[in-house]
Amino acid sequence: MSENKQRGFLWNTSVYLISTAFSVVVTIIVLPVYTRFLSPADYGVVALFVMFGNLTAGVISVNLHFASFRYYFQFKNDREKLRTICSTNALAVILIFLIFGVLIYFIAGWLSSFLFQGRLMTGLIFLSFVGGCLEYLILYLTTLLTAEVRSAQYAAIIIARIVLNTAFSFYFIFCRSMTYLALIYALLLSQTVTLGALLAINRELFALRFSWTDLKMSLQLAFPLVPNSMVGLLYSSFDKTMLNKYKSTESVGYYSFGERFSVLLKMLQDGVAKSWDPYFMNKAHENTATAREAIIKRFYEISFLFMIIGLCIIYYSEEMIKILTTKAYYPSMYVVPIYVYFYLFAIIATLAMNQVSFSKKMGYLLPVSIMGVVINMTLNIILIPRYGAIGAACAIAASALSNNLMLLYFGMKLYPLPLGKWRLLGMYLLLIGFTAPVYLLMPVDCSFLFKVMIKAAIIILFALIGILLHYVSRSSLKHVFGKIRGAATSLAGI
């Protein structure tokens, strides 16, 4: 029985990752088309459009999707109660969206001039809010799909959405000769179709019911998460707003491209986290010195894996951008190496967040988040007027470092582990030392193949030094390759 459960978990995880990977691959494949018809300024407008809608809808939703997700597991055997909760929370969110929608409709002109200096037109302000609301409702319904472990339906929805979005955008670009409006209209249409499909799939969880008691219960659970959500949303939007205010939509476009390529590392981190988090918790509950040492050993191994992948993205971002885009987008290749460090510094949180979670002292997260936002906003105010997109990338990377170091400090206080702080510092100094040459190589005019080989040699040297310094052991490497061979053999036998 346990073997079947384990196989089910691995299968579902693989399906989730495959759907995410499909989305990323399609997004990268269509870049050569988009970048030949859309300028960096057009991409900047789209980034501001998505940012405003997601920010406003995310804040006013008060995280009721989390309450529905949490109570699913408590009431999954009482379907009528569960339907009442899901329906109540969904209706509450829709009512909130309608009230704020009327307000935004009437102040859209002021928001356009005050927040975006007119670069996001008045008509697009309201459409942006509508898009953010649709996106949140999609999140609400996909969260319920995840709770029900319906991985196949989830993957089908994600894949269908990216296909529809691409098809709609191509139609508007090639048949209607649109630029940034093509991506905006395609987004809204694909959101609408996706939401309709999700409602059909989740129809058994909803009915025309509303309970003030259940709404109060949901708000009591979800409302404490609002400050953290607001901090996270501000964290991801302030830099783009500042770039638009002090530079231009072109700078927002360069910055968004740096973010787009860096997210490849985040996808890997999210996939590994599905195995790492349970491993940490199981070992922590053993409450032995051996288990704590095993946690740290595994932490350094996955950290070094992330660093190798991050270094690959840093070094080959130049080639990816030059192959997939036009010369107008080349400045974004200088943003990627710095922005990647936002996720490389987040490696620290893979340990620290689990330490805090295990201690059940989640209140420590709020000061960490607030400090991160204050540092991020301060650095953005200082750096963006002078350095533009590169300054924004430096700000988000530096704030991520301070944020995660503070989180690690609390984690080590709440659940001490034999981390070896100097060892961790040495690993990051090694990484930074190997990152620096990328800015020396970018302006070098030489053979494409020769530059690729030089970069590969640098990355291989980094990996070898890491093995020599025992950040990852040879026995662990043999074990991993053995697992890969075993998995390949099992798949071949299916």
Image (tube, rainbow, N blue to C red):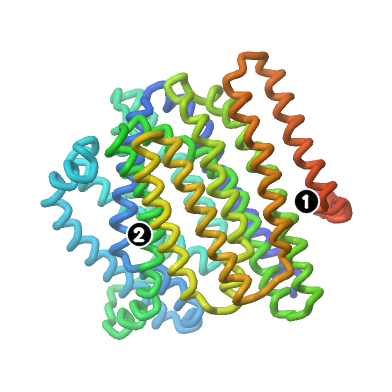
> Where, by quadrant of the figure, is residue 458 drawn?
top right
Using the rendered image of the protein, determine whether residue 84 is visible from the camera's viewpoint: no
| Amino acid bearing label 2 | Leu
Vertical side of 323 occupied by 421: above or below: below
**Residue at x 67% of width, y 63% of height:** 276
Q: Position of residue 313 (x, y in %)?
A: 61, 37
Looking at the rendered structure, the secondary structure element under dot 2 is: helix
N-terminal of the pair, mark 2 or mark 1, is: 2
Name the residue at 23% across, 41% down.
116
Q: Position of residue 53 (x, y in %)?
A: 30, 50
Q: Which residue is mark 1?
A: 491
Q: Position of residue 51 (x, y in %)?
A: 34, 47
Q: Residue at x 44, y 68 (%)?
A: 367
Q: Residues within 10 Å of mark 2 (few under 14, many from 20)?
A: many
Q: Is residue 347 in view?
A: yes
Image location (x, y in percent) of residue 213: 30, 85
Residue that badge 2 annotates: 137
Out of 317 and 105, give the one closest to the viewer.
Answer: 317
Q: Residue at x 75, y 55 (%)?
A: 301
